[in-house]
Image: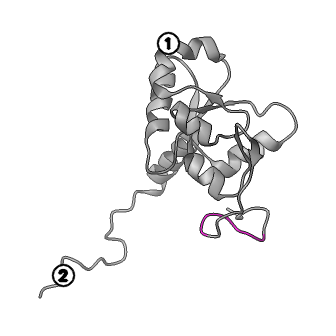
């Protein structure tokens, strides 16, 4: 069997130029926030400078949500966004997790209506898996950090 097509030599995997990579990753940070950064901003004293929007269904919202989040399902954005949100305040959207693009669709719908918006990478799944408190109708809950998603013996991952 000829393996010449399956082997990748150094430099042949098509990496972008440093300038293109810097532009791409810089733009990515303008469009995305991770759960640790959102949690840190919400935990700090004072106004975090953004509002968090849970874009999931009512049934999902009832299972748990980021403390202080506003419930605005994606399908309701066209009719309710301008009633619930201040257009001068940036928005951070989230949905279930990395396997769901609901937060992306919600971010698009909000941006199309003139809102500044970021998507929270990892969604509610990683919020819970990284050990951050969440709210339910019973009150606040917290699960231990999953060692596959967050350090269990350190304040942060160091990244």
Q: Which quadrant does the N terminus fall into?
A: bottom left
Q: Nearer the viewer, residue 3 or 132?
A: 132
Main SS type for the magenta part? loop
Residue 87 is at least partly visible in this image: no
Residue 141 x, y percent position in the rendering: 74, 49
Residue underneath mark 2: 4
- Cα separation between marks 1 and 2: 56 Å
Q: Quadrant of residue 148?
A: bottom right
User: For the point 77% across and 34% down, which residue is it?
Assistant: 48
Q: Which residue is labeled 1 in the image?
A: 79
Q: Which mark is residue 149?
A: none
User: In this picture, which residue range is highlighted in magenta?
Assistant: 148-153
In the image: residue 92, left or right of residue 96: right
Establish if 3 lies above or below 58. below
Label 2 crowding class (10 Å Cα cut-off): few <14, some 14-19, many 20+?
few
Q: Who comes first in sequence, dot 1 or dot 2?
A: 2
């Amino acid at each position: 069997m000829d393996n010449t097509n399956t082997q990748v030599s150094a430099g042949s995997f098509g990496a972008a130029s440093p300038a293109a990579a810097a532009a791409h990753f810089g733009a990515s940070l303008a469009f995305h926030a991770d759960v640790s950064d959102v949690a840190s901003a919400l935990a700090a004293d004072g106004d975090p400078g953004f509002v968090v929007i849970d874009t999931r269904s009512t049934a999902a919202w009832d299972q748990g949500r980021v403390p202080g989040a506003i419930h605005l399902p994606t399908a309701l954005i066209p009719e309710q966004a301008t009633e619930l949100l201040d257009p001068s305040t940036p928005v951070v959207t989230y949905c279930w997790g990395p396997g769901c693009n609901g937060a992306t669709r919600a971010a698009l719908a909000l941006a199309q209506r003139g809102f500044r918006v970021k998507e929270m990478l990892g969604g509610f799944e990683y919020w819970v898996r990284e050990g951050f408190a969440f709210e339910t109708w019973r009150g606040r809950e917290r699960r231990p950090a999953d060692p596959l998603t967050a350090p269990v013996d350190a304040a942060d991952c160091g990244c």
